[in-house]
Image (cartoon, rainbow, N blue to C red):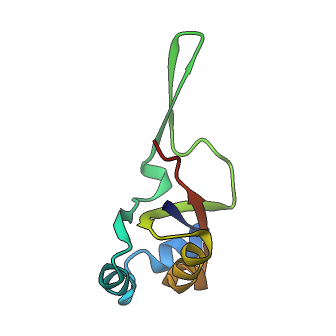
């Protein structure tokens, strides 16, 4: 099963760790054969949000959601079950200063 790991942190923590890398986590997950893709995201102030309402396209600068934590990156993994996905997420360095949301992917 595939799982999306959403790396989230508040703006200060995210900025402080933006260039840290994963400290060997990516290499370990590649060796385990679970890593399928992912990457870090540029800051939310560089984002644009697109919504279509009543056939009108609306563009907004920045993220749409008003939250304390923001998504700073993502990783796609493939492993047998949620317990394994949670173990993998707990090893991610960002779990020490932010949070990792683990979501199962729909399968076709």
The percent position of residue 32, horizontal first and vertical second, equals: 36, 83
Count up the numbered dots. 0
Question: Image height check: is 91 above or below 57?
Answer: below
For residue 100, what is the image quadrant? bottom right
Q: Residue furthest top?
A: 55
The percent position of residue 43, horizontal first and vertical second, equals: 45, 59
The percent position of residue 108, horizontal first and vertical second, equals: 45, 41
Question: Image height check: is 14 above or below 108?
Answer: below
Of residues 1 and 46, the one drawn nearer to the viewer in this rendering: 1
Of residues 15 and 32, the one drawn nearer to the viewer in this rendering: 32
Instruction: Tell me the residue at 49%/61% (across/down).
Output: 1
Q: Is residue 81 left or right of residue 42?
A: right
Instruction: Tell me the residue at 50%/84% (across/down).
Output: 93
Q: Is residue 97 left or right of residue 23?
A: right
Of residues 83 and 89, the one drawn nearer to the viewer in this rendering: 83
Of residues 68 and 54, the one drawn nearer to the viewer in this rendering: 54
For residue 53, what is the image quadrant? top right
The percent position of residue 55, horizontal first and vertical second, equals: 53, 10
Instruction: Tell me the residue at 54%/60% (across/down).
Output: 71
Question: Image height check: is 81 above or below 64?
Answer: below
């Amino acid at each position: 099963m595939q799982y999306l790991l959403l790396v989230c942190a508040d703006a200060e923590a995210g900025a402080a760790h933006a260039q840290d890398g994963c400290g060997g986590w990516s290499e370990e997950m590649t060796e385990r054969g679970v890593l399928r893709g992912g990457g870090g995201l540029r800051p939310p102030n560089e984002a644009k949000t697109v919504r279509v309402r009543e056939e009108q396209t609306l563009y907004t600068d920045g993220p749409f959601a008003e939250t304390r934590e923001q998504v700073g990156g993502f990783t796609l993994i493939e492993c047998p079950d949620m317990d394994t996905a949670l173990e993998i997420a707990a090893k991610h360095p960002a779990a020490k200063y932010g949070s990792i949301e683990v979501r199962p992917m729909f399968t076709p």
